[in-house]
Amino acid sequence: MKTLVLFGRQPIPGQVKTRLAASWGPGRAAALYECFLRDQFERFANEGDQRVVAYSPSTDESQRWFAEAVRGWLLWPQPDSSLGGRMAACFEHWCREPADRVVLIGSDSPNLPNGSFERAWSLLETHDVVLGPAADGGYWLVALRGSSPQSRRIFDGIFWSTSDVLHQTVARARSLNLRLALLPLWFDVDTEADVATLRGLLAAEETAGNKVWLPRTSAFLAGSVPANP
């Protein structure tokens, strides 16, 4: 079973995109993040055998918001834990059988290159762990295969929300003797500079004939947000 899991937060102003909100204001930052979520729900609607939104906060309100916002995805509440604990719990829940392959992404990189997930699942046939390194020192994708508890330990002892996350994770994989594969470097959209990069890339992709399908995000960045994004 190939499962795509997207970690997402209910787009509540002041609780999402806090770095961007510092300059944009919490309402505008949350509106952009909602565009990210809704675009990704549709863009990745046919990836893998099943798709899961791992949502937070784990409240009835959040569950209702995601149930309304997305169709065709399973909903799974993130447990109350550190980021590493939440990711480990996710893989323990969705990657139970030897044939299982789970790809986990965040929701801060809506314009991931086309074919990223197919490449990750292909690499999992010969590797235990696949990482998509991010420009901020973390990673935009982590994928594991099978039911071995050994691979779940890759999240232990990591100092999250630092620029050393990727380095520590790679060292952890080495210490566990896990076979590691890497995808190309990409970036999260967390700051005004990141937004400018995203805007430029979307324009370049469209001009080059490789348009990434992100209608709400593109409309927002063009200054024309749909009435119901």
Image: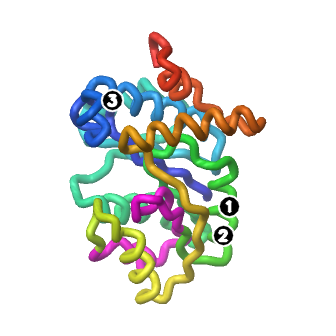
Compared to residue 157, the image places residue 163 above or below, namely above
User: Residue 24 in the image: x percent, y percent?
Assistant: 30, 29
Q: Residues within 10 Å of mark 1 (few under 14, many from 20)?
A: few
SS under mark 2 = helix
Which residue, given by chain and number where applicable, does mark 1 sit on?
A: 119
| Quadrant of res 98 | bottom right
Label annotation for residue 123: 2
Q: Are marks 2 and 1 in contact (CB under 8 Å)?
A: yes
* Residue occupying image coordinates x 57% and y 42%: 111
User: Residue 207 in the image: x percent, y percent?
Assistant: 73, 33
| Quadrant of res 10 | top left
User: Residue 167 in the image: x percent, y percent?
Assistant: 40, 75
Q: Nearer the viewer, mark 3 or mark 2?
A: 3
Query: Which residue is at the front of the view, 174 or 202?
Result: 202
Label 3 and label 2: CA atoms lie apart by: 34 Å
Q: Quadrant of the N terminus?
A: bottom right
Which residue, given by chain and number where applicable, does mark 3 sit on?
A: 30
Residue range corresponding to the magenta coloring: 131-157
Q: Nearer the viewer, mark 3 or mark 1?
A: 3
